[in-house]
Image: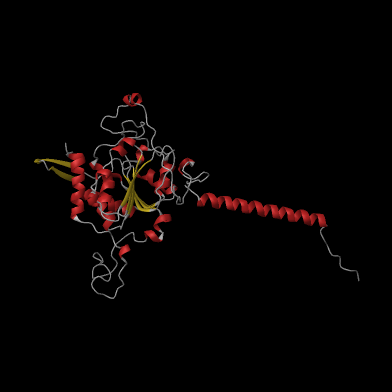
Amino acid sequence: MAAKRRFTYPAKSISCWKIFLSFSLLVFLLMAYHDASYLNDAGSSPDAPRGGARGYDPYGSFVPEGPAVALPSIRITPEEDSKIERHIYGGRGDKPHLGGFTAFDPDGVSVAFWKHMVNNLGVKSVLDLGCGRGTSTSWFVMHGLEYVVCAEGSHDAVTQSLLPKIPPSHIPDGTVFEIVEHDFSRGPWWPSRTVDAVWCVEFTEHVGRNYQPNYFTAWRKAALIFMTHSYWGGWHHVEVHEDPWWIMRMTAMGFVYSDLLTQKMRDIGRLENELVITNPRNESETKTSRTGQHVYGSMLVFINPHVSSRPEHAHLFAENGCFAGDLRNLVECGKNGGVETPLPDSFKPLKMTEMMDDYWIELIRDNVIFPKE
């Protein structure tokens, strides 16, 4: 019976094979270490390009991490500025694609809408993108939201901001806010932490789609996006589209359109259509402004599951959950001594008062409508 032959690799072949495997493993480990390093260090370098850390790419359907570097607007000379006919719009010293704000735009104001965001949706933190002089931002700050960011590209608007004019005694305890000057034509930017909502009114039509990815990075830090768009021309209106275009665009970017929230918020905007402010130095003089046209006319609401699914945003959609005989009038669980387990306070909406409303009206009245001499 013939002996079985045992096949063996030549010694030299085995040695080459081991060297190849070792080298491949080393390359893989080095690549993995490099990827982990720049993701963990995202935004850590003060001189990093494109709004984040060197080599960090913030674009894509995920939540950018780490602090971003704000890129303020580049100013133009007085001679260059004199050639720009701005008419009623602000933006002095800004490049033509910036500005476009007015002292007070009532069409972007809807107190009823903002109250619904806080009372019914449970919003406690907001990024006000394209905040202008901070009209809406000041409302969120003075009504006790925990974290509020006013992000604006126009240096002229930032220097005229209402936020520094809020009396400290009119800012509720625990409220933190900041103003960020960033020009999205220069690169991406996003807030340092995630927020419950983005409030973005009279902004999207001003930024070309080639720069949209830069502000989408900021929106990806929010659980809910409340955005308006324009159906007509205006100062540097370069993206004028109807609802379907924006819904397709946002869906392509990974955001989920909510027709339910969109229609609900537009209905709320229609309920409140004027703001009446009286001059305290001449009570016979009043200013009545039509409000909310942008809100009920073009507001779209999107959900960002990457953020809304996080535990720190689980308090959103703050509808009471206990039945008391009528599904249309649910009650707070455990409030009347029942056996139902009450929710922790962190899951309950912020409490607002009429005094907060009065303080905000005073701020607008004394600094915008009837400014003090």
Residue at 17% across / 38% down in the picture? 372
Closer to the camera, 214 or 4?
214
* Residue sitting at x 38%, y 44%: 246
**Marker count (numbered):** 0
The residue lying toward the viewer, choosing from 277 and 174, is 174
- Horizontally, residue 281 falls left or right of residue 36, namely left
In this image, 153 relative to 288: left or right? right
Residue 306 occupies quadrant: bottom left
Please state the horizontal and vertical placement of residue 323, each as a whole percent of the image. 27, 70
**Residue sitting at the far front:** 168
Task: Look at the image and tell me in which quarter the N terminus lies.
Answer: bottom right
In the rendered view, tell whether residue 195 sits above or below residue 344. Answer: above
Which residue ends up furthest to the right in the rendered image? 1
Residue 371 x, y percent position in the rendering:
18, 38
Coloring scheme of the render?
A: secondary structure
The x, y position of residue 201, in whole percent, is 31, 44
Judge by depth and name the residue closer to the eye, 233 or 187.
187
Q: Using the rendered image of the protein, determine whether residue 346 is visible from the camera's viewpoint.
A: yes
Q: Farthest residue in the bottom direction?
A: 339
- Work out which quarter of the rendered image holds the C terminus and state it: top left
For residue 240, say whether it is visible: no
Q: Position of residue 86 (x, y in %)?
A: 29, 29
